[in-house]
Image (cartoon, grey):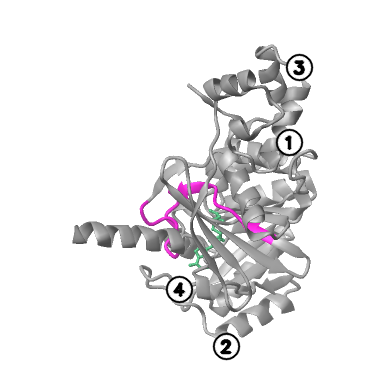
Amino acid sequence: MKKDIVSLLPDELAAAMAELGEPKYRADQIFRWLCRGVRDFAEMSDLSKALRDRLNEKFFIYRPTVLSKQVSQMDGTIKYLWALRDGNAVETVVMSYKYGNTVCISSQVGCRQGCAFCASTIGGLVRCLEPSEMLDEVLFSQLDSGKPISHIVLMGIGEPLDNFDNVMRFLELVNHPRGMNIGMRHISLSTCGLIERFDDLAERDLQLTLSVSLHAPDDETRSKLMPANRGRGVDALIAACRRYTEHTGRRISFEYAMIDGVNDTPEHARLLAKRARQVGAHVNLIPLNHVEERQFRPSTPGHMKAFIQILEEAGVNVTVRRRLGSDVDASCGQLRRRMQKNNAASEALD
Ligand code: SAH
C-alpha cells in the first residue's frame, strides 16, 4: 500500500527518509517542493532519479484538478469545485475581506449529520477527506486565485469533528512554520455540536475559534432541524461549550441561521440570549440560504431586526454575516449538489 506523502508532517517525512537511508535534508527538500504545490516526484529536480523512483514506489501524490471555478461579479468571491483522486468532488470558497483572504474548506465528501436546511447532507456521507486533501484545498485555492490566504474556516461540506484525526493533522500541517504557516487564531472550526469530541479538542489547546452551529436554543426546535441534537440536547451542548471555554480561554461563537417561522420568534431570541450569556458566546446570525430541495425560507428583515434587538438588549454580542458570492451558489454544498443533479439528469438521458 502506497502512503500519502502530502499528509506527512516534516518530522515524519524525515523519519521516512531515514528509513530509506537518505540524509535528513532530503526531507526538507521534499517538503519545500510540496509546499510550493509540486505534486509530481519527477518535478523535484534536486533529487536523484533513483530517489524519485523509490518515492514513487512508496508514496502516492496527487494534484486536485479544477472541475469548475465561478467568480462572483458582485464581490469577487471565488467558488471552486475540485476533483479528488477517486473522482469525488468537494467545494472550496475564497472570500476577500478587509483583513485578508479567507478560504472556506470542506472536511468530508458529503455529510451524515442530516441538518434539515443544509444541501451538503443530501445523499449522506461518502467519505472523510485526508489531511492532504484539506491542505490542497487551501494551497491550490491560493495558487490558482493568486490571492494569499490568511484565514481558514472549516465551514464547507462535512462535519469536521466527525473526521477528527484527519482534521487535527491538517491543522498541524497548515499551521507549520515551514509550511503555509497560517496561525491558529486565523482558523475557525464549525461543528453541529458533536459534544463527545469537545474535550478532546480542548485538550489540544489550539488557539482556533470554535463555532457551534446552534440554530435553535430549545430541544424541540433544534432536534427537528438538527438530528445531531437528538440524544445529546441543548443543555449538554451548553455544558460542553462552557467546559471548552474554561479550558481554552477562547470565546465560542454560535452560528444561527434565521429561518422564517421556525427559529426566529421573540421567544427564541430570549432563550438564545440566555444560552449565549451562559457560555459568553458571540452570536453570528446568518440569513438562511434557500436550498432548492428544502422548504425553508429566510426570515424577513423585520423579524431579523426584532430578533437582533432582543439579543442586544440582553447584552449579547451579535453580528450578521455578510452574504458573499450569492450569485455563484457560494453556500456550501450547493455546487456539488448541482453537479450531482446534472450527472443524474444526463444519466437519465442516456
Ligand atoms: N458541519 C459543520 C460545518 C459545515 S456547515 C457545522 O454544522 O457547523 C457551515 C455552516 O453553514 C453551519 O453553521 C451550517 O449549519 C450552516 N448552513 C448549512 N446550510 C445552510 C443554509 N442553507 N443557510 C445558512 N446556513 C447554512
Number of numbered discs:
4
Q: Is residue 84 magenta?
A: no
Amino acid on which disc 2 is placed? Gly
Amino acid on which disc 4 is placed? His
Along the line of sight, the residue nearer the viewer: 127 or 116: 127
If you read the primary sequence from the N terminus, does the residue marked by circle 2 or circle 1 appear first? Answer: 1
The reply to whether the residue tagged 4 has its Cβ within 8 angstroms of ligand 1 is: yes
Local packing at callout 1 (Cα closer than 10 Å; few below 14, some 14-19, many 20+) is some
If you read the primary sequence from the N terminus, does the residue marked by circle 4 or circle 3 appear first? Answer: 3
> Residue 32 — which label?
1
Which residue: 54% across, 74% down? 326
Q: For mark 4, what is the residue?
A: 290
Q: For mark 2, what is the residue?
A: 302
Numbered disc 2: secondary structure: helix
Q: CA distance from mark 1 to mark 4?
A: 43 Å
Amino acid on which disc 1 is placed? Arg
Which of the image's four quarters has the C terminus?
bottom left
If you read the primary sequence from the N terminus, does the residue marked by circle 1 or circle 3 appear first? Answer: 3
62 vs 321: above or below? above
Numbered disc 3: secondary structure: loop
130 vs 281: above or below? above
Q: For mark 3, what is the residue?
A: 23
Q: Position of residue 131 (x, y in %)?
A: 59, 38
Are the residues at dot 2 and dot 3 in contact (C-beta closer than 8 Å)? no
The magenta span reads 102-123
Q: Position of residue 285 (x, y in %)?
A: 62, 71
Query: Which of the two discs, 2 and 3, sits closer to the camera?
Result: 3
Q: CA distance from mark 4 to mark 3?
A: 55 Å
